[in-house]
Image: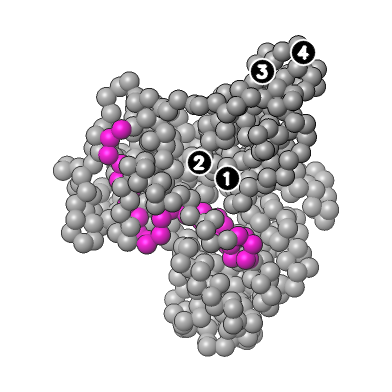
Amino acid sequence: MSENTELRGPDLQVGVRESELADGAMLLGHAHGEPVLIARVGDAVHAIGATCTHWSGPLSEGLLVDGQVRCPWHHACFDLATGEAVHAPALKPVPCFVVRRKDGRISVGDRLEIPAAQPPDVPTPERIVIVGAGAAGNAAAEMLRRAGFQGRVTMIGMESDLPYDRPNLSKDYLAGNAQEEWIPLRSREFYAEQAIDVILDATAVAIDAAAHEVKLHDDRSVPYDRLLLATGAEPVRLTIPGADLAHVHLLRSFTDSKAIIAAAVSAKQVVVVGASFIGLEVAASLRARGLAVAVVAPDKIPFEKVLGADVGQWVRSVHEEHGVEFHLGQGVESIADDSVTLTDGTRLPADLVVLGVGVRPRLALAESAGLRMEKGVVVDSEMWTSHADIFAAGDIARFPEARSGEMVRIEHWVVAERQGQTAARNMLDAGEQFDSVPFFWSSHYDTSVTYVGHAPSWDEAVLDGDLAARDATITYKRAGKTLAVATIGRDLAALRAEVEMERASN
């Protein structure tokens, strides 16, 4: 994403009075021609770059917690003392600056040089292999280097593209608001500089756990000392007549999104099959491109199982305000060159069809390796599988959720990245527990829904605010205990809810 370079607030090279910065407060200003945030924690004052390195969110509007600042947009977290990106989705640090305090004033000096991470002071494996180049796999590869690991790192990806920003494929990029060069997470030069070997267009077909080797589709074998499985998920494909026609698209990969964009140039009427988060984000993005959009789904109310009926009805109303036509409680009987026929016989015109009926985890590799399975690859709180030297993270991992203690599998981008980071540190024997609060967001036109926690079921959904005004918090409870919180237009409330959940589990 492009950075917000607008300079606001005081010139921090000139400085401000100490009395202007209370303990626990932040102040946005600028220095050296860029936005800078100063923050006070006790008697210490820190100065860091004020722009989140994920999607350029304004850190000054975020939350200061335990010597760290959290971004209000997607809950990335940065250490005030080092600028380190402590929690995904940010992978890059923000700059740190010298702070001067003299005669009752605080001013900002030059950038600080942060020392590179030192190698772990315990024996480490020589070769780490990561199967999967998505959220978890890429975050793990980067974290290994950030943690000072100096052995060989190999990342194996099924696609031809380097790791990319998958959430954006159905959001700004598909809508035409994000440039293609923003989508890759890193450049090819970055992986070379970090000595991360990336093998693309490769499918891992077997694991020889005894020999510590991953076998690829082309008969190559990649040796490992420790292995991370981060194979992700694949979209569910319909088996109805016409599902394989050329104008019928899935959306999972960068290639998929580019193909839909190309088809949208000449298309006029699109049918989106599925009222999932991806499905409705696609609907919003294609409406932004001027296409007529109809959504077909068996659900009576969008998102009802996740967000409840009230929020689901509101989301539907937002789309209807933008001209989307809904056919809910319906399935698709067949697809023709110019139409989609529903189960009740209704025929909808369509020269573009996008299927968004869910995903399923890619488990075949783990199953064939004999790992313990239970609706996913079973891992412990450190992301270890049932086999020594093999870890799993992301969409395939079934893990103990820290607040409930229940075994869950969660298909969220940020969860996958954070699990990949935890797995990386634990492949170096850090002994770190994965206890991150689950988080995701979904964008619909100029409105986003933010969700923290995990509530597969609840007996009470408490609404505070006004959905129609796009200013609301919904708290999902079971037996009086808060399991999850959704917010609309209340970024700070989402951050505070996240912190409360973290502290409740400690």
User: Which contiguous range is marked in magenta?
Assistant: 150-178
Q: Position of residue 491 (x, y in %)?
A: 72, 42
Disc with the residue nearer the chain's start (4 vs 1): 1
Q: Is residue 276 visible?
A: no
- Structural distance between the alpha carbons of marks 1 and 3: 29 Å
Q: Give SS at disc 1.
A: loop
Disc 2 designates what residue?
A: 91
Q: Residue at x 45, y 30 (%)?
A: 433
Q: Is residue 173 magenta?
A: yes
Q: Give SS at disc 3.
A: strand
Disc with the residue nearer the chain's start (2 vs 4): 2
Q: Dot 4 surroundings within 10 Å: few (below 14), some, or many (20 or more)?
A: few
Nearest the eye: 45 or 482 = 45
- Type of amino acid under label 1: His
- Structural distance between the alpha carbons of marks 3 and 4: 10 Å
- Type of amino acid under label 3: Arg
Nearest the eye: 433 or 61 = 61
- What numbered label is drawn on residue 104? 4
- Structural distance between the alpha carbons of marks 2 and 4: 36 Å
- Structural distance between the alpha carbons of marks 3 and 2: 28 Å
> Which label sits in the foreground, 3 or 2?
3
Q: Residue at x 72, y 28 (%)?
A: 12
- What numbered label is drawn on residue 54? 1
Disc with the residue nearer the chain's start (3 vs 2): 2
Q: Give SS at disc 4.
A: loop
Marks 2/1 in contact by CB < 8 Å: the verdict is yes
Marks 1/3 in contact by CB < 8 Å: the verdict is no
66 to 481, vertically: above or below:
above
- Structural distance between the alpha carbons of marks 2 and 1: 7 Å
Nearest the eye: 262 or 489 = 262
